[in-house]
Image (spheres, rainbow, N blue to C red):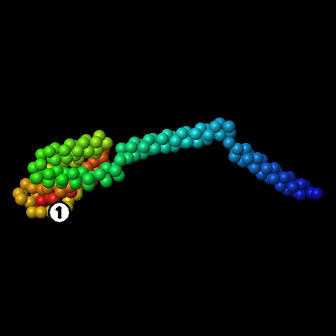
């Protein structure tokens, strides 16, 4: 072997050994230290803990909301009965039977008080109130008797009710144009 061949062979060996050293360094760099592993696990733990806390808060809010409106379906189905009671009382007043009126009034009051205890409240609407599409349902428009009643409630056809803070039936009103 000549010197040139020896030099070339040495250069090849040096290059190969340098490549092996670089590979070993890369392998060493790829392995995380125990501190990095601990930090990554702490991060995972904190994220999981925060996610669980958010879950608890969300389910708690949902439970409270469900409790507030649990009787909504029942209340909604009882509203037509209350309307019928009011119409019946109006007819009994016309007949002027005081004993019948007194008995029906007692039953009506008891029903309303019971529903109020469960969170049902009557939305008070009177003639002259400003029409608000967010809380009123306009059935029809009629010519306003006076200029002051334009765009305002003229008559309430059907009462509206709220269960807690939620409107379960909008009051049906006639507005002036």
In the image, 42 versus 67, the foreground residue is: 67
Q: Residue at x 94, y 57 (%)?
A: 1
For label 1, the SS is strand
Q: Residue at x 26, y 45 (%)?
A: 111
Compared across the picture, whether 66 is left or right of 104 comes to: right
**Is residue 61 depicted above or below 132 in this figure?**
above
Which picture quadrant has residue 151? bottom left
Residue 68 x, y percent position in the rendering: 36, 44
Mark 1 closeness class: few <14, some 14–19, many ≥20 residues within 10 Å: few
Q: Residue at x 39, y 43 (%)?
A: 67
In the image, 4 versus 81, the foreground residue is: 81
Residue 174 x, y percent position in the rendering: 16, 59
Q: Is residue 11 visible?
A: no
In the image, 16 versus 97, the foreground residue is: 97
In the image, 130 versus 98, the foreground residue is: 98
Exactly how many numbered labels are in the figure?
1
Compared across the picture, whether 44 is left or right of 90 comes to: right
Compared across the picture, whether 47 is left or right of 161 comes to: right
Q: Looking at the rendering, in which quadrant would you find the C terminus? A: bottom left
Compared across the picture, whether 155 is left or right of 171 comes to: left
Q: Mark 1 sits on what residue?
A: 140
Residue 156 x, y percent position in the rendering: 16, 55
Q: Residue at x 40, y 46 (%)?
A: 66
Q: Is residue 111 visible?
A: yes
Residue 51 x, y percent position in the rendering: 51, 43
Q: In this view, which residue lies farthest toward the right?
A: 1
**Is residue 61 depicted above or below 7 in this figure?**
above
């Amino acid at each position: 072997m000549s010197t040139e061949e020896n030099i070339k062979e040495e250069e090849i060996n040096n290059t190969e050994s340098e490549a092996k050293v670089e590979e070993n360094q890369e392998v060493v760099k790829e392995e995380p230290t125990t501190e990095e592993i601990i930090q990554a696990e702490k991060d995972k733990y904190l994220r999981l803990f925060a996610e669980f806390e958010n879950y608890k808060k969300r389910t708690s809010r949902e439970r409270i909301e469900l409790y507030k409106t649990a009787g909504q379906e029942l209340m909604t189905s009882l509203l037509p009965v209350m309307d019928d009671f009011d119409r019946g009382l109006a007819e009994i007043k016309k007949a002027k039977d005081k004993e019948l009126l007194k008995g029906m009034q007692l039953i009506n009051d008891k029903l309303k008080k019971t529903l109020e205890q469960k969170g049902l409240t009557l939305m008070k609407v009177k003639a002259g109130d400003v029409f608000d599409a967010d809380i009123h349902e306009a059935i029809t428009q009629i010519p306003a008797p006076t200029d002051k009643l334009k765009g305002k409630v003229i008559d309430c056809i059907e009462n509206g009710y709220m269960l807690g803070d939620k409107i379960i039936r909008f009051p049906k009103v006639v507005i002036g144009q």
